[in-house]
Image: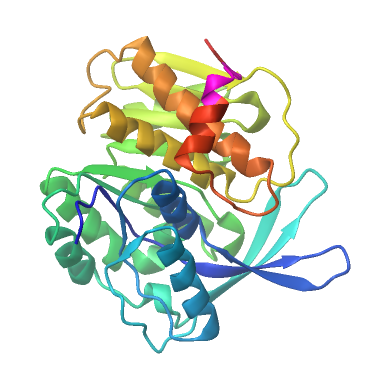
Amino acid sequence: MMNLQVATAGEALIDLIRNDDGRLQPCLGGAVYNLTRALARQGVQTLYLNPLSRDRFGRQLAAGLAADGVHLALPDAVQQVTSLAVVGVDAAGHPDYSFYREGVADRATTAQAMTEACAGSATLSVVCTGALALSPDDADTYLPWLVSQRQAGRTVVVDANLRPSVMPDLEQYRAHVLKALQLADVIKASDEDLECLYLPGADATERARHLLQHSRAHFLALTRGGEGATLLTRSGQTFHARETAAIPVADTVGAGDCFLAGLVVAMLEMGMAPDCGTAQVLPAQAHALLGNAIASASICVMRQGCVPPLRSEVKDRLALSTVAFA
């Protein structure tokens, strides 16, 4: 293998997106799949840990990763079928999901298999997971793996990216998500995620601060839709950034995944240690993190579906100084 930098673990599925005429259009998707592609398209040597199906959809998912230069921990396809998600988009461009994930390929793995795949790369420095991987049903797969990655000294990034509409026991789900976030060095969450977790606080920033203070993470990236994003550090700093002007939104599918990819890319480029945020973060570092993340997300939402930007596209957008910092 090449000098791998990031390993990702979580769902790869087909989004069946409902068109205006009622037909369902299949698109490659899944939050972690989108994140994986987004990282690779920005030049990160990325390892995807989950199996893919030998069915037609699985072959398409594999081809999409290969086209972007992603490395597969399990290049041999498995017999389980591909996960499906039926996606509707409301008038504001926000997606809602129904998932079909019993006996599927991307869940046909173990903590041991993922840990061994990561152990095979001495250069791997960051691991990422979140979204459907935070289902309580998969606790025995992902939690031991996350523990092993912390013990190995890698930076653990967890995207809350909650899916409450498909979890039968919301109380159990919230408790499990909070347990998983305890294993993160870096947390990414949206304002909607924090509301769903029932965290105390008068606004999203206060809820994010509460979550950070009651976790072991060193910083938290809070996305706020059109209001931009906020970076909170364990040392007590708060940085905010947003686009200086409204951008044309095609839809928001994959926006958070591209945001996280942009954040991780900036972390890698600056060589940030796992405990960055425990001490004071320089404003230039915070601006690089937020600027890269927001630019990545903005390019995504201007496109139909999740088409992650290339590194050159993100740099070109950053050169336009479209992001304002506070």
Residue stretch rendered in magenta on the structure? 318-323
In this rendering, would 274 be left or right of 311? left
- Colouring scheme applied when the structure was drawn: rainbow
**Picture coordinates of residue 215, whole percent (x, y):** 30, 34
In this rendering, would 72 be left or right of 63? left
Quadrant of the rendered image containing residue 167: bottom right
**Picture coordinates of residue 276, whole percent (x, y):** 24, 25
- State the residue lying farthest toward the bottom: 79
Q: Is residue 47 above or below residue 80?
A: above
Quadrant of the rendered image containing residue 255: top right
Q: Nearer the viewer, residue 68 or 113?
A: 68
Q: Nearer the viewer, residue 261 or 317?
A: 317
- State the residue lying farthest toward the right: 21
- Res 307 visible: yes
Determine the residue positioned at 24% across, 53% down: 146
- Res 11 visible: no
Q: Is residue 287 above or below residue 155?
A: above
Q: Nearer the viewer, residue 282 or 94?
A: 282
Marker count (numbered): 0
Q: Nearer the viewer, residue 44 or 293?
A: 44
In this rendering, would 78 be left or right of 197? left
Determine the residue positioned at 43% across, 81% down: 53
In this rendering, would 255 be left or right of 208? right
The magenta stretch spans residue 269:
no
**Picture coordinates of residue 160, whole percent (x, y):** 45, 46
The magenta stretch spans residue 321:
yes
Determine the residue positioned at 36% across, 82% down: 77
Q: Is residue 30 above or below residue 221?
A: below
Q: Quadrant of the N terminus?
A: bottom left
**Picture coordinates of residue 299, whole percent (x, y):** 61, 38
Determine the residue positioned at 85% across, 70% down: 22
